[in-house]
Image: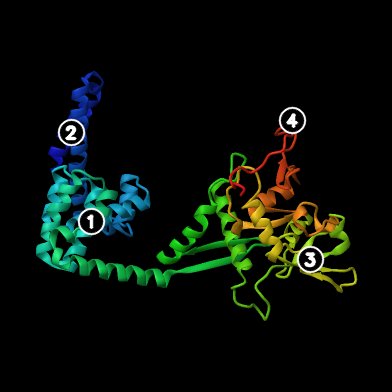
């Protein structure tokens, strides 16, 4: 064997000098031949690794395993070396047809892994005869598809080699998948030192479908001025879904109270736009965040005086709800910010002149905004006002439009 490999090595080395002078058709043919030779050499290499592993050569030379020995001998990463040993064992246990396909240069090593694993599954589900048929089908597919697509096609191999058991096997596999999903489902909420939360987890298929159905419509950019990253849009969409659930009033009570967010702040500081706020779960909020939350009908603020006595815990006259909200929806049809198509159910009522500044809770002092544009208006330089016809219009900042021509939402047609 060593003589043949040395001759092959010399022949391959000679190709380096002639490749640049070949014609284009010859280059293509040479590429095909080189790839076929590469697969054949891979088959030889794997058979050598398997034989050396079986003889215990690595441990005899003082290594702790064949993978460690290969790492040092061939200067490989330990992960690559382990994978080489595993693949050698897989090829050794594979049906003869798989080994012949690799030795013939028909398939590559990744396809061999897929074929061997798929054939093993077929053998367990439908027996040896179906497994033999599967080898031929998969090898034929491997001449047309890469390993990733071959694996996907392999999930329905029983339809081709054992149709009488395919439906039962597919149902059993689906039930096993559902069982794993039910076992592995979890959400981890880790509180950070600054009050933020880190979310991680795995959703089962049904829950994933529900989540995607809820947040996908809210993750599209709201307009040309929406500079949020996809991750930020998904974050805001999840918050909007939670706000919608809070607004529904259908959540179970929590400690005897309705599900709600409570913000505590100093009244004088809030009116002077200087006061921070404390959530009932501990973390503090900036004055801007407190003022924004205070005009959200789905948020229940708790405002205390300097001596700690309650001055206001969600006064109905301050919250934009009930008949007033319905009138606001009839007028604005959805988020009123220019270019936004968010429907009313994703929107909050915003005081044009903030209640802490003496603004009243009435239709003439309210506008409907989605969560993103509600935050944007509180933190940005846009100004909202009602036009002469009583409909909201937004004055852009001078840096965006030096003329500061008022803009209106054109997505929600008026009746």
Cα distance between the residues tagged 2 and 1 = 28 Å
Between tags 1 and 3, which lies in front? 3
Under circle 3, the secondary element is loop
Q: Quadrant of the N terminus?
A: top left
Mark 1 or 3 closer to N-term?
Answer: 1
Find residue 344 and report its image quarter: bottom right
Mark 1 or 4 closer to N-term?
Answer: 1
Residue holding disc 3? 317
Q: Nearer the viewer, residue 277 or 119?
A: 277
- Residue with the most extreme left position: 129
Between tags 1 and 4, which lies in front? 4
Residue holding disc 2? 33
For residue 402, which numbered disc appears in the image? 4
Decide: few, some or many residues near mark 3? Use Cα within 10 Å; few <14, some 14-19, many ≥20: few
Find residue 274 and report its image quarter: bottom right
Residue holding disc 1? 154
């Amino acid at each position: 064997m060593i003589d043949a490999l040395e001759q092959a090595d010399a022949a391959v080395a000679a190709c380096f000098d002639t490749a640049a002078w070949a014609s284009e058709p010859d280059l293509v043919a040479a590429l095909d031949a080189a790839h076929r030779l590469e697969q054949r050499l891979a088959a030889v290499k794997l058979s050598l690794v398997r034989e050396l592993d079986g003889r215990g050569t690595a441990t005899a030379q003082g290594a702790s395993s064949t993978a460690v020995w290969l790492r040092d001998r061939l200067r490989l990463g330990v992960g690559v070396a382990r994978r080489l040993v595993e693949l050698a064992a897989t090829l050794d246990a594979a049906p003869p047809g798989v080994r012949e396909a690799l030795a013939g240069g028909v398939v590559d090593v990744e396809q061999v892994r897929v074929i061997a694993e798929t054939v093993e599954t077929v053998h367990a589900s439908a027996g040896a005869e179906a497994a033999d048929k599967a080898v031929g089908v998969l090898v034929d597919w491997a001449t047309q598809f890469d390993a990733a697509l071959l694996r996907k096609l392999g999930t329905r191999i029983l339809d081709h080699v054992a149709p009488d058991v395919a439906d039962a096997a597919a149902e059993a596999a689906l039930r096993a998948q559902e069982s794993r999903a039910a076992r592995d489902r979890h959400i981890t909420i880790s509180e950070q030192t600054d009050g933020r939360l880190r979310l991680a987890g795995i959703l089962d298929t049904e829950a994933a479908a529900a989540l995607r159905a809820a947040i996908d419509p809210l993750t599209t950019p709201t307009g040309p001025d929406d500079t949020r990253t996809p991750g930020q849009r998904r974050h805001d969409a999840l918050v909007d879904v939670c706000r919608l659930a809070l607004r529904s009033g259908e959540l179970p009570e929590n400690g005897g109270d309705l599900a709600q967010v409570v913000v505590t702040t100093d009244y004088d500081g809030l009116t002077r736009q200087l006061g921070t706020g404390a959530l009932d779960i501990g973390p503090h909020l900036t004055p801007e965040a407190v003022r924004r939350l205070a005009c959200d009908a789905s948020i229940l603020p708790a405002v205390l005086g300097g001596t700690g006595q309650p001055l206001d815990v969600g006064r109905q006259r301050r919250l934009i709800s009930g008949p007033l909200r319905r009138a606001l929806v009839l007028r604005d049809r959805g988020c009123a910010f220019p270019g936004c198509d968010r429907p009313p159910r994703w929107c909050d009522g915003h005081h044009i002149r903030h209640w802490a500044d003496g603004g009243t809770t009435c239709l003439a002092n309210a506008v409907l905004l989605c969560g993103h544009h509600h935050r944007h208006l509180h933190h940005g330089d846009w100004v909202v006002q009602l036009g002469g016809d009583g409909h909201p219009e937004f004055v852009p900042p001078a840096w965006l439009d030096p003329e500061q021509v008022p803009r209106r939402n054109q997505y929600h047609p008026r009746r």
